[in-house]
Amino acid sequence: MAAFLLEVADVSKVFGGLVALKSVSFAIEEGEVVGLIGPNGAGKSTLFEVVSGGMRPTGGTIRYQGEDITNLPAHLRRRAGMSRTFQKIRLFNNLTVEQNLAVAAMQSTPAGRTWKSEVQSALIRLRLTGLVDRKPSELTLADRKKVEIGRAIVGHCRMLMLDESLSGLTRDEADDLVGEILALNRDLGVTILVVEHVMPVVMAMARRLLVLDYGTIIANGLPAEVARNPDVITAYLGTKKGAT
Ligand SMILES: Nc1ncnc2c1ncn2[C@@H]1O[C@H](COP(=O)(O)OP(=O)(O)OP(=O)(O)O)[C@@H](O)[C@H]1O
Ligand SMILES: [Mg+2]
């Protein structure tokens, strides 16, 4: 039996009267690149929150590296190599690019490695070395997104969750960043779960797609199959689904 890196079983999240996630189950193998898609409000960012430990699920279990982490604090998940970016970029605006990466590296670099070398390799990998002394407000959106990714990959990064890291970028900027994201998977073996709205981009990146709609996984499979799935087409057209 394949050992999964991440196993989400029967996870739900309720906000007051709103069911944002309803019995969500899926698993991801080490080394996969999986796309998570779904209409606005489907629950994608909420799923990232509960998987990364920003919020506790209302029900269900999350296993990572074979261990139940449902109640593990977020910083310990990060130290175990589970990292994420935020849909709304969260950088320290009063710190430089290098300092932003350093703060993350100091919190997540495992014993035996130094946070300074983690920062340097992330800067080189993301081609940010010319911008080390800049503040976030002096950067383009594409470079701010790269710094956000840099903060997620410094230290120990085994599973990376990207929440719309490509949105708002030009086609060339997005292609460039896709190349760098896929290199993380190819060169470092990082498992990637990516939320992205632009279908051609997500189809080019992911070898498997999960589709969320109103908090429920409605499809899980190869991108070409998912794109033909009638439930997925209906969800994206925004028409009311028939009784199930
Ligand atoms: N902290 C919160 N408190 C109350 N409701 C919330 C909270 N976070 C999200 N929601 C609601 O949960 C639902 C799912 O939101 P979520 O942000 O996860 O969707 P999403 O798929 O990421 O959407 P988008 O594509 O617009 O980013 C929405 O109805 C949203 O309003
Ligand atoms: Mg979202």
Image (spheres, rainbow, N blue to C red):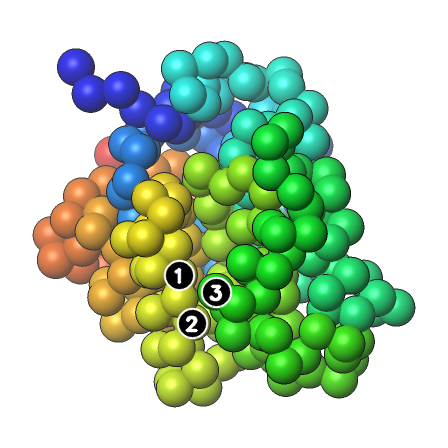
- Alpha-carbon span between mark 1 and mark 3: 10 Å
Q: Compare marks 2 and 3 and give the one earlier in the sequence.
A: 3
Residue identifier under label 2: 177
Compared to residue 126, the image places residue 17 above or below, namely above
| Res 227 → quadrant | bottom left
Q: In this orientation, does residue 18 appear?
A: no
Q: x, y (%) of residue 61?
A: 48, 17
The Cα–Cα distance between marks 2 and 3, rounded to whole angstroms, is 11 Å
Report if the beta carbon of the residue with label 1 is closer than 8 angstroms to ligand 2.
Answer: no
What residue is shown at x 59% (from left), y 74% (from top)? 128
Indicate the position of residue 224 as horizontal and vertical percent values: 12, 58
Taking 76 as reference, is 244 left or right?
Answer: left
Q: Residue at x 18, y 43 (%)?
A: 221
* Residue at 41% over, 21% down: 65
Q: Residue furthest right?
A: 94
Q: Which mark is residue 244?
A: none
Disc sitting over residue 181 in the figure: 1
